Image (spheres, grey):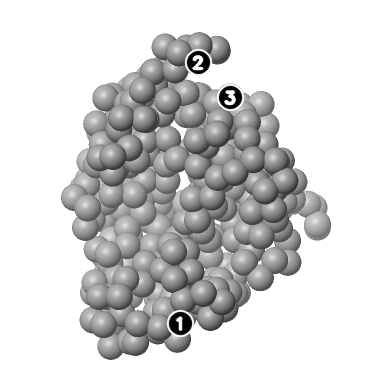
């Protein structure tokens, strides 16, 4: 039986993610209101359309999965009206008890990094979510303010490490020249930095800082050996690329090895294309398939 934390205690994101896995499995439903999807759903390509889309996905996800991932760019393209639509979608998700990972891919340093973190991870913010995606192009240390705020509020972070877009390989596979990570690929250096931080701060099975590792990649080519025993405090992995992009969830263990039990299987278009009337059925089917892969 999972112990109940004292009232007012901050529950680390890693623990809440583990609870979501236990209740609903590892599937995460993306909210990506592409213009063509809005059209297929019979919705206008407008702020009102993305709001209807987002809130419908939340309603269909409720009780079937534990995690959703809105792609903020599709809301942001409508300016302040788009952000208002996103805020209402996030409010629905909070009321439904869903873990929300905002795919914002922010990256900065100093007070700017801290301000971004306050916007997305600060308690009571209209954009408050449970975790965000971040870029560490200026070094993982440049995100220390966000990392500290996340730890204090029980939030999570997912740092881009090895991503599926082909343009990324030239940088992410490049070898670090000096310092403690000399000889490692950039992707591996980010993973190792995150793993060390999780080991220092985590008491449960999952850390609260994760990485993004694309499911369509040969991770060994990025210097990441998934067959090696991962750290005791396992680094969560946000894994885009399943479904529409070609990765098969049946290969989850082969793709991620010892990290598989901490993988968030992210799917968007493969379920959203089912349309509003059959979305709940598509989600339920993918939950079963993901659960079978988990074993």
Place residue 29 in its image quadrant: bottom left
Residue 46 in the image: x percent, y percent?
40, 83
Left of 189 or right of it: where is 117? Answer: right
Question: Disc 1 to disc 3, how far (Cα)?
Answer: 41 Å
- Quadrant containing the C terminus is top left
Residue highlighted by disc 3: 196
* Residue 59 position (above or below residue 154): below
**Label 1, on which residue?**
47
State the CA–CA distance, disc 3 to disc 2.
12 Å
> In the shown orientation, is residue 6 left or right of residue 93?
right
> Which residue was labeled with disc 2?
181
Query: Residue 19: image x %, image y %?
Result: 55, 52
Q: Do the residues labelled 3 and 2 touch (CB within 8 Å)?
A: no
Q: Can residue 124 be seen in this view?
A: yes
Q: Specify which label sits upstream in the sequence, 1 or 3.
A: 1
Q: Residue 107 versus residue 264: which sits nearer the camera?
A: 107
């Amino acid at each position: 039986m999972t112990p109940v934390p004292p009232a007012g205690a901050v529950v680390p994101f890693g623990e809440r993610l583990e609870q979501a896995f236990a209740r609903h499995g590892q599937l995460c439903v993306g909210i990506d209101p592409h213009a063509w999807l809005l059209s297929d759903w019979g919705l206008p390509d407008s702020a009102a359309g993305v709001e209807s889309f987002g809130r419908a996905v939340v309603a269909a996800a409720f009780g079937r999965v534990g995690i959703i991932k809105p792609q903020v760019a599709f809301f942001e393209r409508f300016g302040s009206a788009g952000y208002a639509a996103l805020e209402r979608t996030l409010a629905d998700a909070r009321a439904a008890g869903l873990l929300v990972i905002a795919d914002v891919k922010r990256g900065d340093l100093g007070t700017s990094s801290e301000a971004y973190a306050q916007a997305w991870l600060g308690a009571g913010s209209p954009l408050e979510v449970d975790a965000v995606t971040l870029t560490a192009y200026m070094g993982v240390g440049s995100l220390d303010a966000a990392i500290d705020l996340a730890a204090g509020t029980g939030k999570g972070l997912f740092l881009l490490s090895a991503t599926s877009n082909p343009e990324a390989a030239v940088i992410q596979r490049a070898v670090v020249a000096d310092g403690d990570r000399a000889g490692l690929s950039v992707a591996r250096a980010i993973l190792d930095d995150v793993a060390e931080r999780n080991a220092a701060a985590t008491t449960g099975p999952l850390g609260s800082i994760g990485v993004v590792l694309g499911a369509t990649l040969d991770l060994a080519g990025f210097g990441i050996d998934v067959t090696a025993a991962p750290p005791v405090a396992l680094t969560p992995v946000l894994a885009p690329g399943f479904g529409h992009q070609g990765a098969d969830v049946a290969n989850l263990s082969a793709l991620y090895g010892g990290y598989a039990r901490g993988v968030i299987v992210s799917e968007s278009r493969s379920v959203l294309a089912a349309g509003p009337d059959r979305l709940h059925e598509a989600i339920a089917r993918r939950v079963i398939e993901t659960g079978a892969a988990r074993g």
